[in-house]
Image (cartoon, coloured by chain):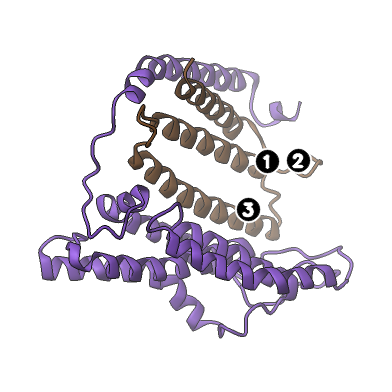
Amino acid sequence: MTQAGHLGRLAMLTIRSVGALVVAGVSLRLMAVVDELSGHEAAAPAVSGDGKLSNPVTAVLLQQRGYDTLLELGVVLVAGLIVSGLGHALLDAGGRQRQQSPLLSALAQILVPVGVVFAAYLLWAGAHAPGGAFQAGAVLAAMLVLAHIATGDPARIFARGRREELAAVSGFATFLAMGVVAQALWGSFLGFPDTYLGAIVLAIEVMATLAIGVTLAVLVVGGDLWAPGPSFTRGDRRP
Amino acid sequence: MTPATLYVLTGIVLFGLGLHGSLAHESALRRLIALNVMSAGIFLVLVALALRPSGAPDPVPHAMVLTGLVVSVSATGLALGLIRRLRSLGDDAGDTERDGG
């Protein structure tokens, strides 16, 4: 058993017994409270607004827990920054046959525009149905990665370099700026008044979607979204 | 056994399995996958605890799960980048298991 290779038998026994104890202990504790928790009604979430944000989860994310969402955007940004800094030669492409894949190209040509439009719909629908900035950003990231894999030159829409970095930073920056503006104008950080809530939330969510899409795609591809795609060369490394 | 109880138990078991895997495996990639299994278990527990008798679930745990999903995806992407970088530098990141682990 390869697992015993780097850990002694005592260490494995300790890990397994501690794991079993954790599972048993937490189960007992949660069994005691789960029926009570699920039997009570939820406390009314402390959200207000002009009625445009009727999806309760989105309302919680952007109003009651707006600070959490701001920091979440910061986490995505930090991860993207670090992966970008690791360098572009992350993929070992040796050993694969050189081939074009017309199937993949055709699929990407059809799917990527549909996916981008669907991401925009998800962003808009988040106000009243399941959806929102993060879901839309994930779909956008998937489309960017698909375009990269299929062609290696995904988007003449974007120029490379500075605009990519701007897109990645814009989500966190917009949210932070809105928070500071709210502090200056209305006296509480991220406390948006009801009359402007719809417009502010929309602006934040649009920039957040763009930032999440670009950053997640960068995370998957390994730092260079606009370089030639990885899969179809034999033996040659990218610079 | 109510649905909430069943989901909570499943989430805890997933957490335990992931915890064991994150410590016991030698390959960094397998430990990363085990961490993702752990987070899946935690999300399941959070969503299960959000069930309410009126049918409309408590939105705060759902929002926390959404936040946690994005954070775990970012962390996984970062960890994968680091593992790839290690391998390009010649360190096999504990990958002594020949079946691609």
Per the image, label 1 sits on a secondary structure element best described as: loop
For the C terminus of chain A, the image quarter is: bottom right
On the rendered structure, is A74 left or right of A231? Answer: left
Q: Which residue is mark 3?
A: B83
Residue A229 visible in this rendered orientation of the protein: no
- Chain letter of mark 1 equals B
- Tell me what hue chain B is rendered in: brown
Residue at 63%, 73% in the rendered image: A113
Q: Which residue is mark 2?
A: B96
Q: Quadrant of residue A222?
A: bottom right
Instruction: Judge whether A204 appears above or below B90 on screen.
Output: below
Per the image, label 3 sits on a secondary structure element best described as: helix
Q: Amino acid at mark 1?
A: Ser
Give me the chain that's purple: A
Q: Which residue is mark 1?
A: B27
Q: Disc 2, disc 1: CB below 8 Å?
A: yes
Q: Residues within 10 Å of mark 1 (few under 14, many from 20)?
A: some
N-terminal-most mark, 1 or 3: 1
Per the image, label 2 sits on a secondary structure element best described as: loop
Q: Nearer the viewer, residue A69 or A192?
A: A192
Q: Nearer the viewer, residue B54 or B68?
A: B54
